[in-house]
Amino acid sequence: MSNKIKPSILPGFMELLPKEQLVFNDIVSKITGVYEQNGFLPMDTPIIEKEEVLLAKSAGETEKQVYRIDKEDKRQVLRFDLTVPFSRFAAQYMNDLTFPFKRYQLGKVYRGERNQKGRYREFYQCDVDVVGNGSLSIKNDAFVINMASKALKKIGLNSYKFQISNRKILTGILEGLNITNMQEVMILIDKYDKITEEQFLSDLLKLVGEENAKVIDEVIKISGSSDDVVEGLKKVAVKNEMLEKGIEETEEVIKYLKLFGVEDSEYAINLKIIRGLDYYTGTVFETLLTGNESYGSICSGGRYDNLAQNYTENVLPGVGMSIGITRLFFVLKEIGFIENYKGSLNDKYLIIPIGETFEYCTEVLNKLLQSGKSAEIYFEDGKLKKKLTYANKLDIKYVILIGEDEVTNSELVIKDMVTGEQKKLKIEEL
Amino acid sequence: MSNKIKPSILPGFMELLPKEQLVFNDIVSKITGVYEQNGFLPMDTPIIEKEEVLLAKSAGETEKQVYRIDKEDKRQVLRFDLTVPFSRFAAQYMNDLTFPFKRYQLGKVYRGERNQKGRYREFYQCDVDVVGNGSLSIKNDAFVINMASKALKKIGLNSYKFQISNRKILTGILEGLNITNMQEVMILIDKYDKITEEQFLSDLLKLVGEENAKVIDEVIKISGSSDDVVEGLKKVAVKNEMLEKGIEETEEVIKYLKLFGVEDSEYAINLKIIRGLDYYTGTVFETLLTGNESYGSICSGGRYDNLAQNYTENVLPGVGMSIGITRLFFVLKEIGFIENYKGSLNDKYLIIPIGETFEYCTEVLNKLLQSGKSAEIYFEDGKLKKKLTYANKLDIKYVILIGEDEVTNSELVIKDMVTGEQKKLKIEEL
């Protein structure tokens, strides 16, 4: 007979055991560390906000997925991304911020998605944005992609490729071809990788007619090195100012990427990249895992003309990107990256008293802590084997055994749990 | 005419501008750093959980304050502390955890409190707990208070005093006096500091009669050094096993506190400390800011017999404590600590290109970043004055000016924004 409640969590929520949580946290702190080192300031906003504010620009899908708080009069919702809170923040504190405002934000967001593997209803996002007051240099576009590069390298991930485009290119081409149902065409191109070639061509034909379809199809298939793509674009038989601007911006982004140290092998120009239709206006990019492209983009972003138009008359152009850390962690687990993660997980020490040696053990502990080491004493009674098992299970690298002889001689025995090597030290030698 | 929505957040939520957010984050990372260094493992649980799980043991006040999600069938609530999720977690993953399980958790919790200054509806808590499987050494009680000491010292706070008691002492005394309305007496003692002396004595008299009231009043007023209090307690004319156990435990806690390096001046035994009535069973403590006691405890905790009794038959005794970081930050702001916070905020560099020197600037940037410095380039056009203002506003200590002469000579001019000092360096000297 038991009146216990079964301990469990809701479906669609990620929860990790300590070993994986350590890796998760190490990844997060490496990524945010890169952002901080590069001048991004931290930001933290409430998870609950006013519905009128967060859903100021209601996108249909979002509204359906939003978590609402069941509370009296005031309509409150949980944030579904970090972009809308950021735009609210920028407008609200505009006079207190220094522009260009470079911020990063790490936080949980909520979406009532259909429950399926690898899709989470609560997940961490980590965003960076640079926002100008009135204007913002194109250098920032390259700078933000460079941040993605530095962050991914920092966690030891090398097998990725940025897929870069500029929305002005396709927009310019469609404008130049006098195509009026531009949005439908964009949506179709965005689906390119999810449908067959025949389906794509037949849909495109229906939307723009044979002649235009041929031009568009040729354009989005231009590939090769970034120089090749730019050359290819310059040869397209469409004259349009926005197209020229898009090509020029792309060339600049590529130029600055190189200066920031992003290597040629890390990116490709991919004219099929579209992203948020009514949000981005220039550079856009996604990030695919080489050999694991089917997981989709692990890091995406781009340039927008006006961050906070729902809240202010001030024009705040910006460029930013987001890593869905919870989803990234899931993917990295799937591809075996987490299992082999080394990271900077500290070497740890476990001090085991044998007999009445606790006081001396605290001396050793305090010495280790003062020198910056991670260390703990095993406090409980029990067999030595159990204590060594504790060290093994927690991946503690060094065990220090202290018996009464060691106290008498001001010594200690240190055992490397990886190599099994054991040696005696004077306490001063520690 | 404008259809803009006023950017604002809900009352009772804390939001910081970058300068304060940097300090907030530095405080948090120092505290969690101390916990990690001392062997505590990170834990992260969902903010939304099943109502049946989080409210398994419904406390009246909690239930009224809880945030509920307005969603279909499944009843979901936002967590109101980190203790209940921890007990659920410990029961759920019991077989995967290594005991004693030392965990820390940092996260936001939600309570629909009445809106008033210094009270938040969303706030960060940072908890540590050590939990044993079946038993747990008393050394952990001292160890946890030692964690509070190390964490507060780490952030540079010195003016605090731990108020330590042991629930067995008062319980033993009341038992020894054959007092049956024990809970009411405890609640009255808990209110001691909030009512007048006369009120307290007259209420106590009503509850336990004159003779008992005299004994209890004398006991809770025993003060002085920890040795004095222990001596005083030993002289109390009440014989009771639990009382003796309480005194013995207190002596042990004091002994181990000293070994861990907690100084005498950091704590006092205060027999009026009660805390969660039906939760704690041994050591209890609170932390008062010396000279600012009226803000109440900034860090509290204690020993409990059984963490997860709502979810499992296994007995998990533990000891833990919690810092309400959002509230602590508020208090530290009030007492002027934040304003003067130095912490480990990094020295930062801002590189300002003058003329067409951007490429060379990226060389300098990459050099600084590689050596671990925080550095950024000012990308935008504009007057030098505006750029220097940016550096000043963001507390950037070093500005590096790079004109065409500097490029020609592989030099740079570095300006200390604090001292105003300016010097020329060769790029290799950086």
Image (spheres, coloured by chain):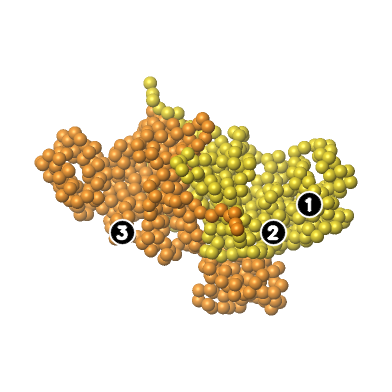
Chain colours: A orange, B yellow
Q: Could you say where residue B272 lies in the image, as x and y percent from the top left?
A: 77, 47
Is disc 1 in the same subunit as disc 2? yes
- Crowding near the residue tagged with mark 2, few <14, some 14–19, many ≥20 C-alpha atoms within 10 Å: many
State the CA–CA distance, disc 3 to disc 2: 50 Å
Chain letter of the residue beneath label 3 in the structure image: A
* Residue where numbered disc 2 is placed: B142
Q: Residue at x 62, y 69 (%)?
A: A351
In this view, B173 is above or below A61: below
Q: Secondary structure at mark 3?
A: loop
Between residue B87 and residue A261, name the one nearer to us.
Answer: B87
Q: Could you say where residue B396 lies in the image, as x and y percent from the top left?
A: 48, 44
Q: Residue placed farthest to the left in the image?
A: A211
The answer to which of marks 1 and 2 sits earlier in the sequence is 2
Where, quadrant-wise, is the N terminus of chain A in this rendering?
A: bottom right
- Crowding near the residue tagged with mark 1, few <14, some 14–19, many ≥20 C-alpha atoms within 10 Å: many
State the CA–CA distance, disc 1 to disc 2: 20 Å
State the CA–CA distance, disc 1 to disc 3: 64 Å
- Crowding near the residue tagged with mark 3, few <14, some 14–19, many ≥20 C-alpha atoms within 10 Å: few
Q: Residue at x 24, y 51 (%)?
A: A193
Is disc 1 in the same subunit as disc 3? no
Q: Residue placed farthest to the top in the image?
A: B1
Q: Secondary structure at mark 1?
A: helix
* Residue where numbered disc 3 is placed: A292
* Residue where numbered disc 1 is placed: B170
Residue type at numbered disc 2: Ala
In which quarter of the view is residue A171 placed?
top left
Q: Secondary structure at mark 2?
A: helix
